[in-house]
Image (cartoon, helix red, strand yellow):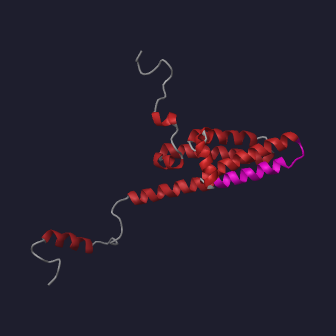
């Protein structure tokens, strides 16, 4: 007796027979969504890793600049390093106590959105431009990365939404000016 060759269920025999004779592995998925999801996760992981590396290098440049015994150099370098440390915590979403404290505050909550990160990176880049050759190099790379992430948002919105949270303004979708709302008075 063959369990799949019964005349009562010829459809099962056909389906199993065509599956057995196919060249695919039995555990291989027939859908491309798993491949797309894995490439999306690889892309977001790559941007998070690049961001973490960039913030770490920005910290090194800022501390090197702050070592000079001039008041403004110490102040600008220390503020830039502190901002980079906060953004490093936001990018890697660790350590948990720092992230939960940032999420609890109104200012910190905005850092997890694209708009908040863009503003923080722009501020970091402006300070880095004042830190000599290495500062200029790192400021340029910082701006290229943030524009690259925005380009990612245009091309792959799912990956962009995985990296950033939606702000209140972005989630409502209301980008109208006062008094101009599509013809209503």
Q: Position of residue 96 (x, y in %)?
A: 61, 54
Position of 106 with respect to 14 (left or right) is right
The residue at 75%/48% (across/down) is 81
The residue at 49%/42% (across/down) is 154
Q: Which residues are magenta?
A: 52-70
In the rendered image, which quarter contains the N terminus? bottom left
Residue 39 is one of the magenta-drawn residues = no
In the rendered image, which quarter contains the C terminus? top left
Residue sitting farthest toward the top: 185
Q: Position of residue 9 (x, y in %)?
A: 13, 71
Residue sitting farthest toward the left: 7
Residue sitting farthest toward the bottom: 1
Position of 167 with respect to 7 (left or right) is right
Q: Nearer the viewer, residue 12 or 85?
A: 85
Q: Is residue 94 visible?
A: no
Residue sitting farthest toward the right: 69
Q: Position of residue 62 (x, y in %)?
A: 77, 48
Q: Is residue 123 visible?
A: yes
Residue 124 to residue 9: above or below:
above
Residue 82 to residue 95: above or below:
above
The residue at 43%/56% (across/down) is 36
Q: Nearer the viewer, residue 158 or 168?
A: 168
Q: Position of residue 156 (x, y in %)?
A: 47, 47
Residue 62 is one of the magenta-drawn residues = yes
- Quarter of the rendering containing residue 6: bottom left
Magenta span: chief secondary structure: helix
Numbered label tally: 0
Residue 114 to residue 59: above or below:
above
């Amino acid at each position: 007796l063959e369990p799949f060759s019964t005349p009562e269920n010829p459809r099962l025999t056909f389906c199993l027979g065509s599956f057995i004779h196919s060249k695919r592995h039995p555990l291989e998925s027939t859908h491309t969504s798993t491949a797309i999801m894995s490439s999306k996760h690889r892309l977001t992981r790559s941007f998070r890793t690049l961001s973490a590396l960039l913030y770490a290098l920005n910290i090194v440049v800022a501390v090197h600049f702050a070592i000079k015994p001039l008041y403004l150099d110490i102040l600008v370098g220390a503020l830039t390093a502190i901002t980079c440390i906060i953004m490093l915590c936001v990018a890697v979403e660790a350590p948990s106590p720092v992230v939960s404290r940032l999420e609890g505050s109104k200012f910190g909550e905005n850092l997890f959105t694209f708009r908040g990160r863009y503003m923080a990176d722009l501020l970091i880049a402006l300070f880095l431009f004042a830190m000599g050759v290495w500062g200029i190099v790192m400021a340029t790379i910082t701006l290229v990365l943030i524009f690259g992430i925005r380009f990612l948002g245009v091309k792959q919105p799912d990956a962009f939404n995985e990296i950033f949270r939606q702000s209140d303004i972005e989630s409502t979708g209301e980008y109208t000016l006062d008094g101009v709302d599509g013809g209503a008075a």
